[in-house]
Structure formats: C-alpha cells, structure tokens
Image: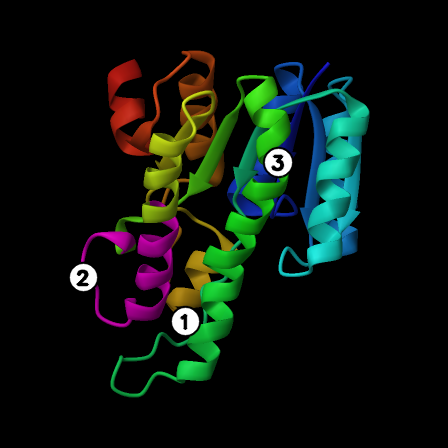
Amino acid sequence: MAVAIVTGASRGLGRALAIGLAAEGWDLVVDARAEGPLQEAARRAEEFGARVRAVAGDVGDPAHRWELVKAATAMGSLGLLVNNAGSLGPSPLPALSSVDVEAMGQLFMVNVLAPLALVQLALPALRANHGTAVAVTSDAAADAYEGWGPYGASKAALEQLHHVLATEEPDVVVIRFDPGDMWTQMHQEAFPGEDISDRSPPEVAAAALLRLLASTPASGRYHAAELVEQVA
C-alpha cells in the first residue's frame, strides 16, 4: 500500500491534506505536537478506510523523526513526504531591527533543519518508490513583507534546499508548494486581533495540492492559486 507522511497534521493545511489523502486511498503516518487534535484528525482520516498511525511529537527531535519514517516503511511503500509542520515565530511579528536572534535560530531549526533531516531519513524509500517530497513554503520566501523577515528567511532557505534536492535526486519528485494566505490559526497569530475570515480555508489549498499530486507533476514550485485558476 502507498503510504504518506504528513507533518503538522493536527490543524490547518496538514489536517485537510491528511484527510484528503485518506479519501484518495493513501495510508498515513501523521504527526503534530498536540496529541488530542492529532488523534481527532487521525480518526477523521480513518473514516475513509485508511490505516493511520498518529505519532505525537516534535519534528525537531531526531528520535521522533526516526519513528515517523520507521512507522511509514513498516506500513508499506513510502511514496510521499509532506513537510508541512512549521513555526511562525514570535507574534506580533517583529521588525528585523529588534528580532531575537536566538529565537530566530529556533525558528530555523523547526522550519529548515528538521524538514531536511526528515527528508534525509525518508530518501532511501522515496528513491526506491519513485516518490514525492513536498515542502510547504510561502510567498514570504520571495517577497518583502514588514515583520515577516525571520519567517520568510526560513522559508526561503527551505525552498532553496528543496530546489537543490530536485537536482540531486532525479528519482524523486520534489515539490515546493505555496498554499497562499489561509484562514488558519498560524495566520491568525500573524495578525493578532484582526479579522482574517476573508482568507480561503485550508481545504482549498489542500485540494489544489491533491490535484497536483494526482497529475504526475515534474519537480518545481507551484502556487495553490494558480492551480485553482487552471481548474476553473
């Protein structure tokens, strides 16, 4: 059976994507730091007949990353890794003139180094199964938004690592996926006290990524809004 690892699956895009993959016949290994919401998301995915292993933990923990990959390879053929888990960093968003550099180091650990380490562990199986690695990125990786310097820099680094990975790993499809603005808890934390209900729910971006994955795409950078426009 085809197995997917989805990190950060307890809420937002990760949750929507895990449920969508289950509906399309994937078995899943999902993770998040919050046990309760993760288990709830796993139960929802299981309603589609998927086998789901929910592993609560922090992707920054090497032992946790090993557990994710071992669980996935024990279930079947690991064909998809979605590095979705990430951190916004301090909220309200700080200017670079006042950002805590040590806190920024922790942000890079979660958003850059942990995803790379997980990719490294998953690569043997992904190569063997001609699988796909997905890095969830952001337009903040390329554009300049006030206050988004630390987060954007971490996503830019994540993107570049996966851009190079696509060159180095011809047997693996490497997708850099920008979901755009979403109505999620993380995005709300970026705009404390503001009404962001005009943003699209994460299910829209998840559906766009699912369509992309089903189309046998080439490695590259894809934006959810462009994929939605192509369908429309």
For discs 3 and 1, the disc positioned in front in the rendered view: 3
SS at mark 1? loop
- Circle 2 crowding by C-alpha within 10 Å: few under 14, some 14–19, many from 20: few
- Image location of residue 173, percent across then percent down: 43, 24
Q: Identify residue for label 1.
A: 193
Pick out the residue farthest to the bottom: 98
Question: Residue tagged by mark 3?
Answer: 122
Q: Is residue 55 above or below residue 231?
A: below
Mark 3: few/some/many CA within 10 Å (<14, 14-19, 20+): many
Residue 16 rendering spot, x and y as whole percentages: 57, 35
Part of the protein shown in magenta: 141-159
Residue positioned 63% across, 41% down in the render: 121
For marks 2 and 3, the one nearer the N-term is: 3
- Dot 1, crowdedness within 10 Å: few (<14), some or many (≥20)? few
**Residue at label 2?**
144
Is 147 covered by the magenta stretch? yes
Residue 73 in sight in this render: yes
**Quick one: 67 or 128, which is closer to the camera?**
128
